[in-house]
Amino acid sequence: MRFLERERTTLAKLLPDLDPALRETPLMDLERPGSPGITLFRDSGGPGLLVPGSHQGRGATAVDALRVQRAIGSRSPSLAVGTTMHHFSMATLVGLGDLGDSMAWTLIEGVAESGCIIASGFAEGRSGAGILDPTMTATPDGDGVRLNGVKRPCSLARSMDLLTASVLVPREDGEGEELAVALVPADSEGMTVSSFWSSAFLAGAESEQVTLTDVRVPPELLLRTSAPAGQRLDELQTAGLIWFQVLMTGSYLGAASALVERVLLNDRVPEHDRVRLYVETEAAATMVEAVARRVDDGDLGEATLTQSLCARYAAQDTIARVVPRAVELLGGLNFMTSDEVGHLAACANGLALHPPSRSRMTGPLAAYMADGPLTLA
């Protein structure tokens, strides 16, 4: 198949209206603050991408979702990175549903039917923290709680309908505390969004600061995990981190692919240069897709998490090689007469900035190779 044809075919199958709309919108309009990209994503049914078809969603597999994110990233890196955080939240909620939480399925169906955008207030941005480690403080208030805390950066902050956050709440039997996932409506009294992301790159992802001040969350929006304080939800956290690595890597490979595609379509570039870029980029995508296939096979354990990290770090190396080469082959005139080439090049390198960083994971991966357990730094 042609370069990116498989990815765009998958996007057309699952969200048929999205790619044409993105293609018709100038790249720099999609990348600016106030981008129309998130609205296009919502209107196309994107919020329900990972929701099973039996629960009113699009029923995408992990391989499907990876291909969709790469296709979106080739049109708008900001939209791909921002919506990865929505999918990360949805994967966590689906995981709670699979653990037997019927209320989670009710909320998931509501998201799919209404096209709600969910921002992530989980701890995925904190080194050494599990994704469900509490990021907000919760104070009991009747049957519900009041939340206080700050999440920054928080992608989709200005377009979100709901914010997910992990909290510790009193157990219903009165025996200590347990972990819960709170869903906070964006129009809740006490929730504010303020500017945080000052860079022009990935500005369309709406990565701002979200502050919660005495925000009340009613009991019907608290998904209890039945896990005591201090006890890890290993399977759920591991699955969430795998989804995060796979979809975020696909998103940034999409940004790099946008540059590679421009080179491949330029017949003035020597064939050997075009083929080399093609091979390197496709090899990285194939590595990540292999991890996605393990997810679809139900293999969500420590070994798959390790492989997801390996694939992600290898993709970072590939991006670091192919992006400067693509810029060079496109030539100075392309760079000087348009913001697009420089913008895509800067955005594609953002993968290295997401936790867990390779430098922090060197020790844990070395210990894992020596038959120790995998820990996250």
Image: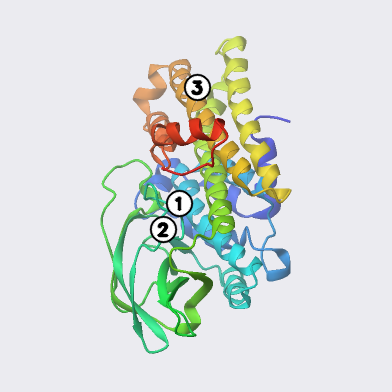
The CA span between labels 2 and 1 is 6 Å
Is any atom of residue 272 visible in this view?
A: yes
- Name the amino acid, label 3: Val
Q: Do the numbered discs 3 and 2 sit on residues whose CB atoms are within 8 Å?
A: no
Q: In the rendered image, which quarter is residue 147 located in?
A: bottom left
Answer with mark 3 or mark 1, whichever residue precedes in sequence.
1
Residue occupied by mark 2: 156
Determine crowd level at label 1: few under 14, some 14-19, many 20+ residues with C-alpha closer than 10 A: many
Q: Note whether 201 is above or below 195 in the view shown.
A: above
Q: Position of residue 326 (x, y in %)?
A: 48, 21
Residue occupied by mark 1: 82
The CA span between labels 3 and 2 is 29 Å
SS for callout 2:
loop
Q: In the rendered image, which quarter is residue 338 located in?
A: top left
Q: Position of residue 194 (x, y in %)?
A: 26, 61
Residue at x 51% of width, y 44% of height: 248
Answer with mark 2 or mark 1, whichever residue precedes in sequence.
1
226 or 74: nearer the viewer: 226
Q: Do the numbered discs 2 and 1 sit on residues whose CB atoms are within 8 Å?
A: yes
SS for callout 1:
helix
Residue occupied by mark 3: 322
- Name the amino acid, label 2: Leu
Determine crowd level at label 3: few under 14, some 14-19, many 20+ residues with C-alpha closer than 10 A: many
- Name the amino acid, label 1: Gly
